[in-house]
Image (cartoon, rainbow, N blue to C red):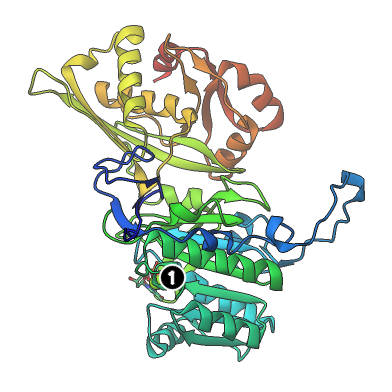
């Protein structure tokens, strides 16, 4: 009997593997993401295993912690402060970093800038593009500045050729733009498929670890379609960075979602200008730019991103509903949270929210789901409901519970300092934090509130 070529189905979004086609992926709940790929012969599956594992033939006995010799981890300075921060203090030698994001968000731009900066430190860098021609890269590079000769460019998609090039040149840093265009001849699936993307990454992982080269991998986030998203390789790499932001707005946020060499939840803020991405060192100022004066439904609140406080304007619009069912909308924050807070206002403060539509927006296009925004959202809703503006120099933060109580949040002092730095005069904070903030931050009027009803009285 002739043996049938086996095939498997992969979810292109999260890499879920299944023996049959499914409409909805049980892993990530996306629809229509399954694509058939030829199954790998069993013998190939050990490829890309790190050295020291079962098949390598070198047995290393288990060690105690004190026997493990540490060598100081070496970090390269990328000369982009925001990126260094997200990476945990610089680019670690021999690490594999995935940079994900929507097409056109600026991944190639920032990596070209990083490559340029590293080459200015006379580090050898190899930039491999599978998407753009050398002329296109040169055009972009001309806009970004001048580059040293220790940076070399190459247009290639075949991984064996790339491996040869890396072995020949022995660079310290490599950029692969993008992983979805690379292919490994040993895998029969098309470039961009889950098998190809995984296999290519494991080859790059082996190169990074065996030759101690730092490798940046670009991965496009795809909503649907035939290419695998970067999520399928998150588990293989050391660091995962995602570029977020509205393509129409000029600011971009770089977020670490996984980092073996530093903290996650750190963010870096950039602005896309005509000379590439420029760091925004004071995001609060940037986020509050163009704030309306004396408008009802607007209040400034403070959120913590990583270790950094960011002031942000919460806007709310409450207006009478024309239908029996009030409409709610949340832009930049959690929709269910807005619903919940509207219910709290109805029950605990006596606001007839059931008869009103409510729209909440975080100005500047930021996306934040931190509970410390609750008090700000409540005050914005109340202010719009009563059509009563809140003074421009007021900043409020705190978590709101279901009984309408205002609860403490972390890093109260840091938030207060940030508000003071930007010229705010009055802080509305949870009662539990009042004393602590008052002793550590001077020249600010601190109002401690224990419930939303308390906070409403101040308005
Ligand atoms: P790009 O970095 O190619 O995005 P990605 O690699 O993530 O797909 O380009 C980002 C966008 O930024 C592109 O539409 C053009 C724009 N851009 C600028 O506004 N200024 C610049 O200096 C550069 C290089 C690009
Ligand atoms: Mg690109």
Q: Position of residue 178 (x, y in %)?
A: 43, 70
Residue at the spot of label 1: 178
- In the displayed orientation, state which residue is furthest to the right: 66
- Residue in the image at 40% along x and 43% along y: 367
Q: Is residue 415 above or below residue 166?
A: above
Q: Is residue 71 above or below residue 63?
A: below
Q: Position of residue 427 (x, y in %)?
A: 53, 28
Q: Position of residue 397 (x, y in %)?
A: 50, 28
In-front residue for pair 373/78: 78
Q: Is mark 1 within 8 Å of ligand 2?
A: yes
Q: Is residue 249 visible?
A: no
- Residue in the image at 46% along x and 61% along y: 41
Q: Quadrant of ligand 2?
A: bottom left
Q: Is residue 444 above or below residue 24?
A: above
> In the figure, is residue 2 to the left or right of 72?
left
Q: Is residue 18 above or below residue 451?
A: below
- Residue in the image at 88% along x and 44% along y: 64
In-front residue for pair 56/128: 56
Residue 3 position by quadrant: bottom left
> In the figure, is residue 260 to the left or right of 25?
right
């Amino acid at each position: 009997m002739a043996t049938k070529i086996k095939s498997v189905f992969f979810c292109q979004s999260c890499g879920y593997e299944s023996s049959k086609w499914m409409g909805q992926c049980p892993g990530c709940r996306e629809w229509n993401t399954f694509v058939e790929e030829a199954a790998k012969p069993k013998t190939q599956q050990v490829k890309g295993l790190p050295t020291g594992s079962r098949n390598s033939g070198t047995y290393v006995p288990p060690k105690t912690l004190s026997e493990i010799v540490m060598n100081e981890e070496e970090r390269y300075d990328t000369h982009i402060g925001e990126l260094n921060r997200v990476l945990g203090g610089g680019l670690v030698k021999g690490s594999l970093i995935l940079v994900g994001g929507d097409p056109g968000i600026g991944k190639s731009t920032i990596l070209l800038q990083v490559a340029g900066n590293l080459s200015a430190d006379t580090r050898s860098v190899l930039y491999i593009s599978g998407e753009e021609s050398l002329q296109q890269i040169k055009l972009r590079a001309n806009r970004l500045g001048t580059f040293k000769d220790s940076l070399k460019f190459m247009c290639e998609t075949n991984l064996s050729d790339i491996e040869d090039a890396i072995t020949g040149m022995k660079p310290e840093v490599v950029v692969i733009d993008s992983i979805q265009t690379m292919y490994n001849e040993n895998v029969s699936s098309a470039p961009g498929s889950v098998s190809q993307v995984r296999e290519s990454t494991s080859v790059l992982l082996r190169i990074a670890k065996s030759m101690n080269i730092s490798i940046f991998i670009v991965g496009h986030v795809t909503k649907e379609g035939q290419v695998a998203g970067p999520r399928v390789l998150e588990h293989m790499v050391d660091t995962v960075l995602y570029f977020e932001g509205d393509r129409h707005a000029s600011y971009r946020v770089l977020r670490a979602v996984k980092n073996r060499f530093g903290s996650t939840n750190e963010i870096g803020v950039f602005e896309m200008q005509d000379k590439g991405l420029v760091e925004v060192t004071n995001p609060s100022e940037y986020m509050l730019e163009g704030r309306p004066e004396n408008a009802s439904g607007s209040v400034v609140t403070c959120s913590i991103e990583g270790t950094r406080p960011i002031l942000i304007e919460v806007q709310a619009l409450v207006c009478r509903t024309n239908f029996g069912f009030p409409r709610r909308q949340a832009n930049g924050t959690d929709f269910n949270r807005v619903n919940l807070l509207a219910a709290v206002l109805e029950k605990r403060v006596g606001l007839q929210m059931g008869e009103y539509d409510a729209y909440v927006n975080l100005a500047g296009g930021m996306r934040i789901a931190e509970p410390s925004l609750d008090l700000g959202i409540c005050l914005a809703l109340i202010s719009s409901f009563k059509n009563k503006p809140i003074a421009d120099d007021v900043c409020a933060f705190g978590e709101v519970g279901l009984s309408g109580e205002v609860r403490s949040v972390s890093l109260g002092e840091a938030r207060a300092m940030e508000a003071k730095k930007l010229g705010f005069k009055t802080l509305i904070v949870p009662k539990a934090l009042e004393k602590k903030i008052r002793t550590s931050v001077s020249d600010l009027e601190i109002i401690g509130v224990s419930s939303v009803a308390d906070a409403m009285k101040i308005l």
